[in-house]
Amino acid sequence: MHFIYNNLVHISWLILRLIALFNQKIKLFVKGRKNTFSILNKHISSTDRIIWVHVASLGEFEQGLPIIEELRKQYTDKKILVTFFSPSGYEVKKNTKAADIVCYLPFDTKNNAKQFLEKAKPELAIFVKYEIWPNFLKELRKKEIPTILVSAIFNKNQLYFKSYGVFMRNALKTFNHIFVQDANSKILLESINLNNISISGDTRFDRVAQILNRANNNELIAKFKENRICIVIGSSWPEDEKIIVESINNSERHLKWIIAPHNIKNDHILKLKNSIHKKTTLYSEGDLATIQSFEVLIIDNIGLLTQIYSYADLAYVGGGFATGLHNTLEPAVFGIPVLIGPNFKGFKEAEELVALNGIRPINNYIEFENLLSSFLDQPSQSLLKETGAINASYVEENKGASIQISAYIRTLL
């Protein structure tokens, strides 16, 4: 099976190089990996002591960040190396100050794994959530480098639990320890004779708790909101925006709307702005002297959304009508109600908060309007406050994964 896997990896790499000629994202994926070993050579000396953290993309980086920050505090004599699989993570965080070295993970070939580990020489490897790369894991085990998987979550439909999934099950068995989010994941792993498992929860709760406690002040956003009810639309896709724009255009309420689209390319931002009939401006064009006169603010840059949620009275998180729901914990931590599209199955925190009524899913424009009415049209707005309190409590009750993981890491270093 290893032979078949290695051949598939090489074939996939060839195909991706061809696709890169026509696709910008895949071009970044391929081109960025050409620089990995030169980055390692430039930033790692023979005397450096390295802790390696690997993440798939931006969401997993945020998930791993509380652990990375704890490592930096505790092990000041070591360098933190962070690798990404996806361009959507690397291109945003390649200059992050959270790590000393940031690069792409080379494709999972035997030679790449050997060369990478010979250059990086990590004392510890930490993989976040889903990242299972057999050749890297095999080489880590061979070199006796402690390796852990954190914030992992499993379901019975995954390859590991199929009769034909022996190869990937063996890859899982190379980890020294696996920290999972829930009891179901632990039971599944134990069913394939894996016992080095701890239920730690999800480190994202620790991450959003950090966001809550930092300074979230933004003078322009504060001036825009004034004392009005503010609805923040986070990481919206066209399917979400169709409903949101219809609501904005038809609304007679004196609300403030902030839209932070997933796609911030100029053509999409312009199309979105032109579809809104209310007075609308872009964040990049915002002026403190006039910003309060606008009803709709479109965020046309990245990195502000978590800060902007702190000004929201209610949030809508996008992706539930499209490719996948975005992070609902980021607004939930601020103690506000959260609305989402209908496709949230498989997103554990969303499923649990829907069951608790802290998150409310919608299927169409009418349901969105009905929910707005129930939250905003009561004089006391008690439902708004009660629903938000459910979300804040949920985050508070689920913190602590990073503490448990960090305690285990201290036994390895």
Image: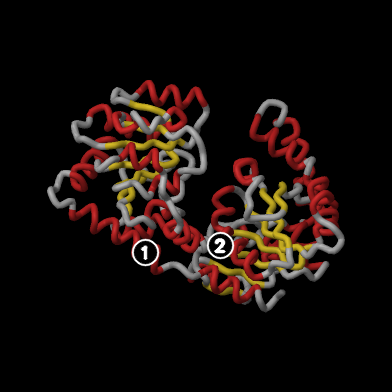
How many C-alpha atoms fall within 10 Å of the one at disc 1: few (<14), some, or many (≥20)? many
**Residue 3 in view in this figure:** no
* Relative to 344, residue 243 above or below: above
The residue type indicated by label 2 comes to: Pro
Question: Could you tell me residue 22's position as x and y percent?
Answer: 68, 26
Question: Could you tell me residue 276's position as x and y percent?
Answer: 33, 25
Of badges 2 and 1, nearer the viewer stands 2
For the C terminus, which image quadrant? bottom right
Which residue is denoted by mark 1 in the rendering?
394
Question: Could you tell me residue 47's position as x and y percent?
Answer: 85, 64
Which residue is denoted by mark 2 in the rendering?
66
Question: Could you tell me residue 314's position as x and y percent?
Answer: 30, 47
Q: Residue at x 69, y 72 (%)?
A: 176
Q: Nearer the viewer, residue 242 or 296?
A: 296
Q: Is residue 95 left or right of residue 284?
A: right
Q: Secondary structure beneath disc 2?
A: helix
* Relative to 396, residue 132 above or below: above
* Relative to 90, residue 356 above or below: below
Q: Secondary structure beneath disc 1?
A: helix
Q: Residue at x 48, y 37 (%)?
A: 262
Q: Residue at x 24, y 56 (%)?
A: 385
Q: Residue at x 47, y 32 (%)?
A: 300
Q: Is residue 36 left or right of residue 351?
A: right
Sequence-wise, which precedes: disc 2 or disc 1?
2
How many C-alpha atoms fall within 10 Å of the one at disc 2: few (<14), some, or many (≥20)? many
